[in-house]
Amino acid sequence: IHLKIYSPTVLSLTMVDLPGLTKVAVKDQPADIEEQIYSMNCQYGSNPNAILLAVTAANTDLASSDALKLARELDPRGERTIGVLTKLDLMDPGTDASEILQNKVIPLRRGYIAVVNRGQRDIDADLSIRVGLRNEERFFRTHPVYSRDRSISGKCGTMNLARNLNGILIHHIRECLPELKIRIANMMGDVQGELDALGMPEGSGEDPGALGGKLLGLLSKFSANFAAMIDGRASNTNQHHDGMPGLS
């Protein structure tokens, strides 16, 4: 399922929600469901540009987390792994996840962030996401432990998780931008070299720069059509009005 959300209140992020690791096939699942899910997680998680969100329930033993184990396999140096703790509202009375949030149990370079999502009962009751976020904010704001320590309160809540991810994205773009500029310049140089090798058409009075611009325009339209095909927005016609082939 490819879902795009446009809103002035959300950050620009691309997220891939992968299935949790499973051990036993249930109902009509194939017998090798464990291998399939593991392979799928590795396929997306091995991308060096991907940030891994190792989601673990706070009311379980962190040392037995399959998500952290897989994240360590895919990201041995821990440069792109963030631990996400869920179900803090279901922890036993008198217990909390403060030591994990302080990175004292299983340290991660990017640390941990705690969230409280809607439960199945809330979903069945048609509780909106907006109300769920308000309930989450109230939980952390009134909690006797998470609300006292500022170093912990800044690591609690879905909004803090989103800001953290957006900051990582901006930092990554700044790091990759110089290399991207070099690659674009090299590609433009290669295209210009091919144009020069083809020469000018006979009887053409057009400026070489104008021809190069026209070619780049055609390439841009082709790229847009290709992206539309991937996004499922391609036209059903085989030919567009501008002569570009339809990618339907």
Image (cartoon, grey):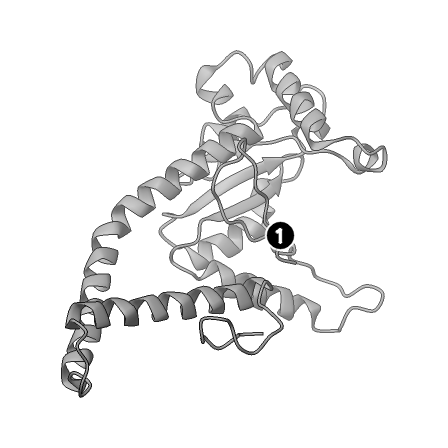
The image quadrant that residue 117 belongs to is top right
The quarter of the rendered structure image containing the N terminus is: bottom right
Instruction: Give the residue displayed 38% in from the left and 40% down from the top.
Output: 168
Q: Position of residue 175 (x, y in %)?
A: 26, 47
Using the image as rendered, state which of residue 127 and residue 225 is in the foreground.
225
* Location of residue 157 with respect to 234 vertically, above or below: above
Q: Read off the residue under disc 1.
A: 3
Q: Residue at x 72, y 21 (%)?
A: 93
Is 120 located above or below residue 31 in the figure? Answer: above
**Position of residue 216 in the picture relative to residue 59 (left or right):** left
In the picture, measured across the screen, residue 88 lies left or right of residue 241, that is right
Return the x and y of residue 119 as percentages of the image width and height: 76, 35
User: Against 12, is 31 above or below?
Assistant: below
Is residue 243 toward the left or the right of residue 94 in the image?
left
In the displayed structure, 40 sits above or below 54; it is: below
- Is 223 left or right of 35, judged from the image as shown? left
**Residue 159, how many percent across, how many down?**
53, 29
User: Tag 1: residue type?
Assistant: Leu
Which secondary structure, mark 1? Answer: loop
Looking at the picture, tell me which residue is in the foreground, 241 or 238.
241
Label 1: few (<14), some (14–19) or many (≥20) C-alpha neighbours in 10 Å: few
Whether residue 150 appears in this view of the structure is yes
Residue that lies at the very extreme toward the bottom in this rendered image: 202
Res 109 seen here: no
Q: Where on the picture, by quarter, is residue 84? A: top right
Q: Residue at x 56, y 53 (%)?
A: 16
- Quadrant position of the C terminus in the picture: bottom right
Residue at x-position 32% and y-position 41%: 171
Q: Pinpoint residue 176: horizontal percent, then vertical percent.
A: 27, 52
